[in-house]
Image: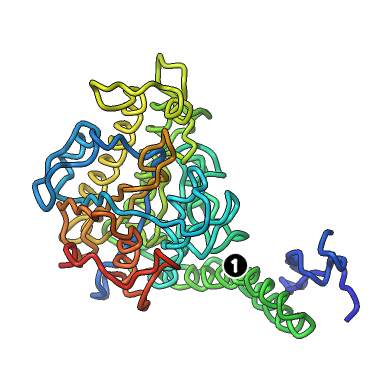
Amino acid sequence: MSKQSRRRFLRGVLNGGVVSVGLPLLNLFLNENGSALANGAPIPLRFGTWQWGMGMNKALFIPKQTGTNFDLPPEIAMLAPVQQHINLFTNFDVYRDDNPNVCHHTGWVLMRTGTAPMHANDLPGETIDVTVGRHIGKQTRYLSLSAAATGDARDSYSYEDGSSINTPEWSPLRFYHRLFGNDFQDPNAETFTPDPRIMVRKSALSAVLDDTRKLNNQLGAEDRARLDQYMSGIRDLERRFDLQLTRPEPREACVLAEPPRDLPNGTGADLVSQRHRMFVDLMMIAMACDQTRVTNVNYTSPFAGTTKPGYDKPHHTATHEEPFDEELQCQPNCSWYTQRAMDEWAYYVQALADFKEGDGSLLDNSLIYATTDQSYAKIHSIEGLPMFTAGNAGGRIKTGMHINGAGDQASRLGYTLQRLFGVEIDAWGTKSNRTSSEIREIIA
C-alpha cells in the first residue's frame, strides 16, 4: 500500500462546515526504520487513589499491634480522628523479579498494576483506577479525574499504557472551571434544556467515527490497534456528549461552592497543603454531582520537591543527605515531611466522612486506595511498602484495622479491591506478583 500523508484528517460535517480531527502517528506515515437518585437507584460507589512520596520511617510509622484499636506511632499519630475509617497495611512486599529496582518508580507501579517495570520510562499494564473506572465510570461525564497538589502536570500515577497517561489538573481554579463551566449540567436544576452546542458536536463526532471505519480497512494490524486506541478517546467524548444530552438524576448532595482562589506556583509545604485541600474539596463536589466515580489525588511525587520553612533541603534531597538520628530512630526532617503527608491524608479522609450524602457520608460510598513509592527512601527500599484504604465501599469492607502482611504480596490488596468493585478477574499481577488471594480480614 502506498504511504499516506501525515496531513490526512478524519472529517465530520458541522452545520454545513467541516470539523477535522487529526490522526496519531501511524506506521504508514513512517519510513521503513520507523525513525520519522431520585428514581430510587442506589447511591453510586466511588473508587479513588491517593499518592504520597518517600514512604516512611519504620520505627515511627508501623504500629506494634494488629487488628482493631491499633497503636499510632508518631508518624501516623494524626490519624487518630479517622482511625475508624481507615485500614493500614504494612509489611507487604512487591517483587521486581528479573527487573531492576527503578528508584522511586518500581514501588508505586507495582502496587497500581501488579507488574514490575523494566526501566524508568516503562509503564506496564494499566493502573487499577483505569480498570475499575471502566467498570463503574461509564455513566458519568468523566471516566476518572486526576489532580496533582504539586502543581506539576507531569505528576501522574494513572495510565492506560505508556502512551496514554491521564494528565492531572495542576490548578484548582482551572479544575473548577473544567468541572462546573459552561458544559456542566446541574442535576438539581428545575428545568433541563439540551445544549445545542453539544448536539452539533456529537453529530460531527459521529461522522468522524464513520470516516475512521473506512480508514481502518486500509491499515495494517499494528496501525489498526494504534488507531483504535487513539479513537477510544473520541468514542469516550461521544459518550460524554450523550450523557450531557440526557437529563441527569437529581443529587441532593450536589451543592456547588464558589470558585477557589488562584494559587502561585511553588512546592513549599504550606502551599502544597493548600493546593491539596482545594483539590480534595473539588473532587468531593465532582463525586457528589456524579461528574465522576473514579478519582486520583496526588499529594507529592516520588521525587518529592516539597520544602520545609527554615530547612535548606527539599524532601527528596533530605532522604539521601540527612543523617540518621539513632536516638530518634529516624531522619528528623524527613520524618517531618512524612508527618505532613499524613496530615493531608487525615484531611482527605475526614473531609469525605464529613460530606453528607443520603443517610450517610461520601466516605461511606467510597473506597480510597493510598500508595507510596518507597518504604525507606534513603536506600530506595521497596520491602514492606505501606498502603492504606479509607471508606467501606458501601459496606463491602471492614475498617479500623492494621493488617501485617508478613512479607506477602502487596498485589493482594489491588486484587481484593478490584473484586470488591465487581471487576471479573480470577487473578491479578504478573510473575511473582500474580495472585488470586483476597485479603479476607477486611471483607465484610
Quadrant in the picture for residue 338: top left
Quarter of the image that includes the N terminus: bottom right
Q: Which residue appears farthest toward the front when viewing the image?
A: 98
Residue 353 position, x and y percent, is 21, 49
Q: Up-down: is 2 above or below 321? A: below
Q: Nearer the viewer, residue 129 or 142?
A: 129
Residue 391 position, x and y percent, is 23, 56
Q: Dot 1 lies on which element?
A: helix
Q: Up-down: is 261 above or below 285? A: above
Quadrant in the picture for residue 246: bottom left
Q: Which residue appears farthest toward the top when viewing the image?
A: 310
Q: Nearer the viewer, residue 150 or 9?
A: 150
Amino acid found under the numbered disc labelled 1? Gly
Please tell me which residue is depicted at 21% across the width and 47% down the height of the picture: 354
Label total for image = 1
Q: Which residue appears farthest toward the left when viewing the image?
A: 69
Residue 270 position, x and y percent, is 38, 26
Please tell me which residue is depicted at 40% across the width and 38% down the height of the picture: 54
| Residue at which label 1 appears | 233
- Viewed as shown, does residue 396 lie left or right of 193? left
Quarter of the image that includes the C terminus: bottom left
Q: Nearer the viewer, residue 55 or 323?
A: 323
Q: Up-down: is 36 above or below 375? A: below
